Image (spheres, grey):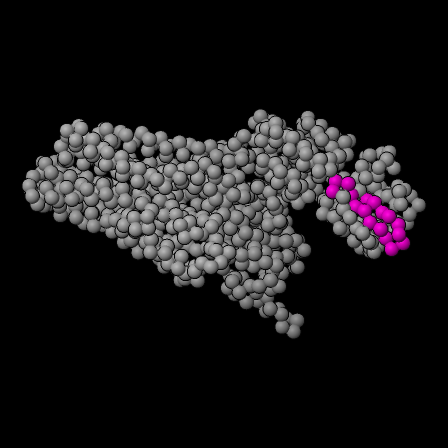
Amino acid sequence: MTPISCKVEGMHCTNCALSVSKYLEKKGMQDVHVSFATEEVSFVAPAETDSKEILEGINQLGYRVVHPDDAPVKASFFSTLSFKFFFCLLFTFPLLLHMWVSWSWLHQPWVQFGLTLPVYLVGMWHFGRSAVRSIMNGMANMDVLVSLGASAAFVYSFVGTVVYGNPDYMFYETTAAIITLVFLGNMLEEKSVKQTTTAIAELAGMQVTTARLINTDHGHEHINEVDNRILRPGDCVLVNTGDKIPMDGTIYWGSGHANESMITGESTPVSKQEKDKVIGGTLLEDGSIKVYITATGKDTVLSYIIELVKQAQSDKPPMQRLADRISAIFVPLVLGIALITFLGWYFIGHTTLATAMMRSVAVLVIACPCAMGLATPAAVMVGLGRAARNGILIKGGHTLEMFKNIKQVVFDKTGTLTTGRLQLGAYEHPGMPEDDFKKIVYSLEKYSSHPIARSIATLWKAAGEVPLQQVREHKGLGMRAKDSNGNEWQLGSFKMTDGLATDDSHSLYLVKNGQLAGWIDFIDEERPEAAKVIQQLQQAGIKSILLSGDTHRKCYELAEKLGITEVYAEQSPEQKLQQIDRFMKIAPTAMVGDGINDAPALSKATIGISLSDATQVAMQSANVVLLNNNLGTLPLALGLGKHTYLTIKQNLFWAFIYNVVAIPVAALGFLNPIVGAGIMGLSDVVLAINSVRLRYKSVHR
């Protein structure tokens, strides 16, 4: 199985993307994602597949596959939708003018033919070629409807001109207006949809092209400006005030403040010192630093986030799959309705041939399968893009559907409602030398990923260590091991002491051979934004629950400060899973944790939400990641998810209702083809504008 990604130029609407998607699925490709807005295609090819043949097939559909190594080719203005629209408008305007002014020469059949022919040729070169290719590939698209409608009116008018020369047979303005208005609709749709992809463009714009590479020669540093692409892990670079940091790395000299707002959503510049990590693409607002490069190219945080957002935007929520299934049969269905309309009016309604034809043409040109294809991607791109700009990563478009009914949020305590920056308080070790106490505690805790363990391992690393055997971590309890003298050690929560301790107020307890050997206290302050977040959720009708492995006393103290009324303390990881399962039977539930220790519970919940430093984002398994460890963005994340889902529903409702109402109205003769083409051209624009509203509307639940 080979994953393949490429850029495909020439896709002008969602129907183009659907044609490419159908072609790839027909060829047996898996995990197919096609976005006409970003012009990107990705799929997984089976082992025996000739990928060159598959990509050539996309070219034969009328699009251009661009490989990463290909030189960029700027499209000629004459090939753009804007040029085609204005060119056609130049000839269409006098054709429409003849309906209001009495200039006799404009009523001449051959004059109208001469004005229509350039429009028809341009239209058929654009829509007709696409229609023919789609039919040849067994995937009729919207261009088939436009081409048939315009051609029917043109051929009828041309025959009337040659045979009768009578203006009563002239519908040239219909042909020209259909083509011109569809070009207008496509042009507006293209411009509107580009507004939905600004987040990707802004993130991509952060990528740096040059860097100041530091080379050392006999103890002397030489600084050269180089192409960013030649940097490799292990290189050293100089970054001065106002420069963008070229790649991810660690500061080994200097200090400053970096603006990470585009990645983490944190507007305040972040202080950076020696040994701090920095993210490629972020701006050094003041100071001067030397950075040891740790990741380049696709391995950087920025590249990972861009790729994650792209994948999420191209991922289809379940409701879009229904729209895709309808789109797949839509064109043949409309062709059938148009034929029935023509036959019904001509044979049953006893109208003239011209009237029957115009009503069937109106059906062809007013139908809009593109609206159904655009409904979801437009909203998803705007919603996920706004989330990314605020330091919220939503993994997968399918996640959006999970937001719709969230009624309760379960919080872990340490590192989630508290800062997780633990400060060592008091500790006692009666009958045991302090150095030995620190050594055994460090030796046990260095094997654990719990926040308390990480803190103490950092603090007491210098104390040295004791060789241990049979080291085991009991999730939610603590560590067990034996030393070389056969002593059995336990270090963990009050629960692990199994009755040996009577005071449950301490953070850690050390037990040696079944006897209490000491205890340690850590101070962990609540997050300053936590109380406000709980209050905002309460105002939105969402219940907050505290679920923690910490002691009853500490959990209830924190819950009382924050206004949480439902608390479950001293819960093992297995018990947490059971509780999440029970909560979900009551109502859809979101779980908020640190993303590493809480991974099983996060996976179990309706939506798993983790708090993470941006440099650790690739480690997160949650559906939603709040970068910069910022719990304050949780209400925005829930609100954006809910409102993006609502926008998708609004768009799909409009797309379905538009077609369900417009097609019968056209078939009954209430709309002429020109009005139909105009309405169809604007239908997609309505969806795009409704989606772009997500960038600005208030969405805090």
Give the mark count.
0
**Could you say which is closer to the camera, residue 568 or residue 271?**
568
Image spot of residue 516 (x, y percent): 88, 41
- Asked where in the image residue 100 lies, by quadrant, the reply is top left
Q: Position of residue 643 (x, y in %)?
A: 49, 33
Q: Is residue 61 magenta?
A: no
Residue 329, picture quadrant: top left
In this rendering, position of residue 612 left or right of residue 185: right
- Horizontal and vertical percent position of residue 304: 54, 52
Residue at image position (89%, 45%) is 513
In this view, the residue farthest toward the bottom is 218
Name the side, left or right, on which 138 lies relative to 27: left
In the figure, 96 relative to 282: above or below? above
Residues 502 and 41: in front is: 41
Point 6% across, 42% down: residue: 165
In reply to whether residue 479 is colored magenta, the answer given is yes
Q: Give the image quarter of residue 6.
A: bottom left
**What residue is at 76 percent from the left and 46 percent from the top?**
473
Residue 241 is at least partly visible in this image: no
Q: Which residues are magenta?
A: 475-491
The residue most toward the right is 431
Q: Position of residue 190 (x, y in %)?
A: 35, 45
Query: Can the viewer see residue 627 in this picture?
Result: yes
- Most foreground residue, 456 or 484: 484
